[in-house]
Image: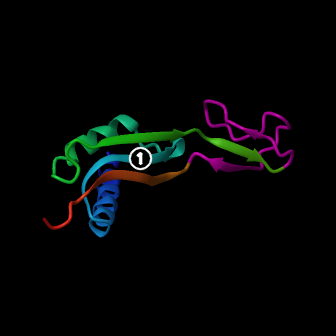
Amino acid sequence: MHELSLVEGMMDIVRESASQNNIKRVTRVKMVIGELTMALPDSLQFAFSALSQDELFRGAELEIVQLSVICHCEECGNDFRPEDDYIFRCPGCGNGQVIISQGHELYLDSYEGDEASGPS
C-alpha cells in the first residue's frame, strides 16, 4: 500500500507550509492523481483518515481529483483516451508513436486552513 507513504509525504509538505504561514488547523487538502500512478482513491482516503488525528489535521477533508489517461498522436495530432487494455495506438491513424500527455500526475494541489490568532 504505497498510498500510506504518499499521504505521509503530502502531509509533511502541508505541515511545513502551515508552520511557515501561521496556519493552526488544516480544513481541506486537495490532491491530484493520474490514472497511471495506480494510487487508489479509497486507500488514499483511508490513509489520510488514519494519519490525520493530530491537532493540525483533525477534521480535515481530503479532496482527490483523478485525471484520466490522455494520449497525443505524433503522426496525426489526435488526442485520445487509450482503450481499456492501455493500447497506446492512435484510433484515428493507427500510429503507435504517441505521447502520454495526461495520467501520470501526482501532486498536492492546495490546502486550506484557519490562521492562528495573534497574541492576546
Q: Quadrant location of the N terminus? A: top left
Instruction: Look at 61% across and 41% down and name the residue there.
Output: 69
Residue 87 lies in quadrant: top right
In the image, 32: left or right of 72? left
Q: Residue at x 30, y 56 (%)?
A: 11
For the stretch drawn in magenta, the main secondary structure is: loop
Magenta stretch holds residue 94: yes
* Nearer the observer, 116 or 99: 116
* Quarter-of-image position of residue 79: top right
Q: Quadrant of the C terminus?
A: bottom left
Region rendered in magenta: 75-103
68 displayed left or right of 90: left
Residue wearing tag 1: 30
Residue at screen point 57% across, 45% down: 103
- Coloring basis for residues: rainbow
Q: Position of residue 60 (x, y in %)?
A: 27, 43
Percent coordinates x, y for residue 111 in the rendering? 38, 52
- Looking at the image, is 62 positioned above or below residue 26? above
| Residue 93 among those drawn in magenta | yes
Q: Nearer the viewer, residue 62 or 36?
A: 62
